[in-house]
Amino acid sequence: MTDNTEKTLEQITTKIWREEAEVDNPFAAAKSYCAGFDVYGDLLGKISLVEYLWLLFKLDPPNKAEARTFEGLAVALANPGPRDHSVRGAMNAGVGGSTRASALIAAISIGAGNLGGAREVFTAVQYWQQCGTDIESWIDIIDNPPREERADVWPEMEHTPGFDPNGASCPMPVKQLLDHLVEIEQNEPLLWLQSHRQTLEQHTGSPLAFSGVAAAAFFALGFEPEQAEILFLLLRLPGAAAHAIEQEKMGWSRYPFFGNGLTLTNDPGPVANND
Amino acid sequence: MTEKSTNLTNGPERLKFFEDNWQTEMGAWFPGERVVLRGKDVFTELNECSWMEYIVYAITGKNNPKLATIIEGLSLLSTSYPDPRLWNNRIAALAGTARSTGALALAAGIAVSEATIYGLRPIKGALDFLYRASDQKDHGIPIEEIVKDELKANRSVSGYGRPLINADERIAPAMRFLKSIKADSGKFVKLAFEIEDYLKNTRYKYQMNIAALNAATVADLGVSLNEYYYTSTLAFIGGILPCHLDAQTKPEGTFFPLSVDRIKSMPCANREWSN
């Protein structure tokens, strides 16, 4: 058992945060600093949500172009729409009257994956780190994707990360997002992706997806793959939350059940109960 | 018609094929009538299974009471510690002290059990290593070389060594249990101990941890990596639930509270935000 009076108290070590205690309560902060900025005495009223998000991860303010790029990405990702797997998960929670937390857990759990999800973005940012803006490297990694030698909890990628294996041509919103992000600063990786998109699509056999633009943007903004993965999870939650609440009010009877959509191909049929 | 017979590999045609068309051998509910799992009627053919036998059947498609017994016994002895300092249990306790719900606490506790320094990654990794090691041994490669190669490639050997302490107090009771059901002397259990015999005499001084023994036990039953992964996802709930309940029934907010001076902030000069 620990004797707190004699031993040094264990601490949380952080670069992100510093607090000063209230004089009457060591468990309440009078001042909170994020990367040296007084959060409630200075940032509040001055900083945008997206700038604050950037500051939390980068520990330095973004320049104007970085803030605009990050904001553009955040707006584009905020609502993947009610057909998206992660949003469907959240809506399922809603229609069943589940806890609101479970709606976001559902969206995060589903939106974490290799198909259009955060793990895909993680892997795609790794590709960017490896290949940069060298088309030969990209073609090589598309043709010879890296494989884990040791078993992991994540399934293997089944397609080139950042491209939609179920797509036809590149959807207009994906192109609009890429064009918008390029216009802000002519950022090299984004510009390169815009000019090489069709070549990459020919080699992957699939169109560029939102996850691909997001990965390029995170890479262009200097985020690590781990940061990109968790930010992608976070930035896609607003739509999941709103759709979950909406469907909660609508109720299960106005939500698809796919009643006739399932076929059991090995149905043993009714079995006599001997009781 | 199945997907394979349509020769659809990707693109929107594949999605069109699957629209309102989920063909499955896994199972279905016939409303008001019956339910089928993997071709068996739940009410009349699986009704005498234990809960874990049912789960094993769902995951593997095989009736395997011995595997179910092993999973139950080893989960009880090795992954159900009711100590809220352990990272996954602590999440459930925090949910309790913050007055969240039991299901949310359990969901979060299970989710984080997919960890790297403990939990599902080492669990799956240990089986992966044992299967690879056995294969290499069958090809005449000595244990020393197998382990050295593993250390060289990964700087660790899944199932050996342990955070906080080296010795694993679970081995002895687990072996007593395995002996009682005649599951303590298979080829893989012997291999696991052979590897330990080598490793504990190296400069690493690694001892076997329970992940290696558990993996060896299921390897002796021919369980696949994925089957083991899925059967292990529930292994921690015996520890998670009591930790949540304990915190839930004590005064709110009292589980390991942190005062402001428990934050050790790394140096960062105060500064002012400028737009």
Image (cartoon, rainbow, N blue to C red):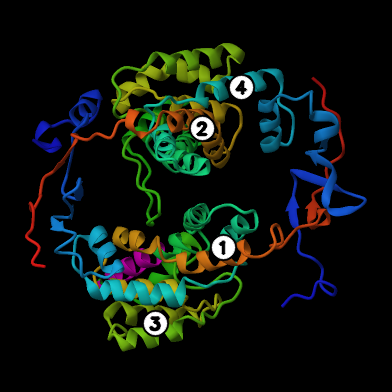
- Give the residue drawn at x 25%, y 76%: B66
The answer to which quarter of the image holds residue B249 is bottom right
Compare residues A160 and A93 and report the one nearer the observer: A93
Q: Secondary structure at mark 3?
A: helix
Real-space CA distance between mark 1 and mark 3, rounded to the nearest whole angstrom: 36 Å
Left or right of A140? Residue A244 is right
Label tally: 4
Mark whose residue sits in front, 4 or 1: 1
Q: Where does label 3 land, which residue?
A: B193
Real-space CA distance between mark 4 and mark 1, rounded to the nearest whole angstrom: 39 Å
- Give the residue drawn at x 43%, y 24%: A81
Mark whose residue sits in front, 3 or 2: 2
Q: Which mark is residue B244?
A: 1
Q: Secondary structure at mark 1?
A: helix
Q: Closer to the N terminus: mark 2 or mark 4? A: 4
Q: Main secondary structure of the magenta part?
A: helix
Q: Are marks 4 and 3 on the same chain?
A: no
Q: Secondary structure at mark 2?
A: helix
Q: Which residues are magenta?
A: B124-138
Q: Where does label 4 land, which residue?
A: A71
The answer to which quarter of the image holds residue B245 is bottom right
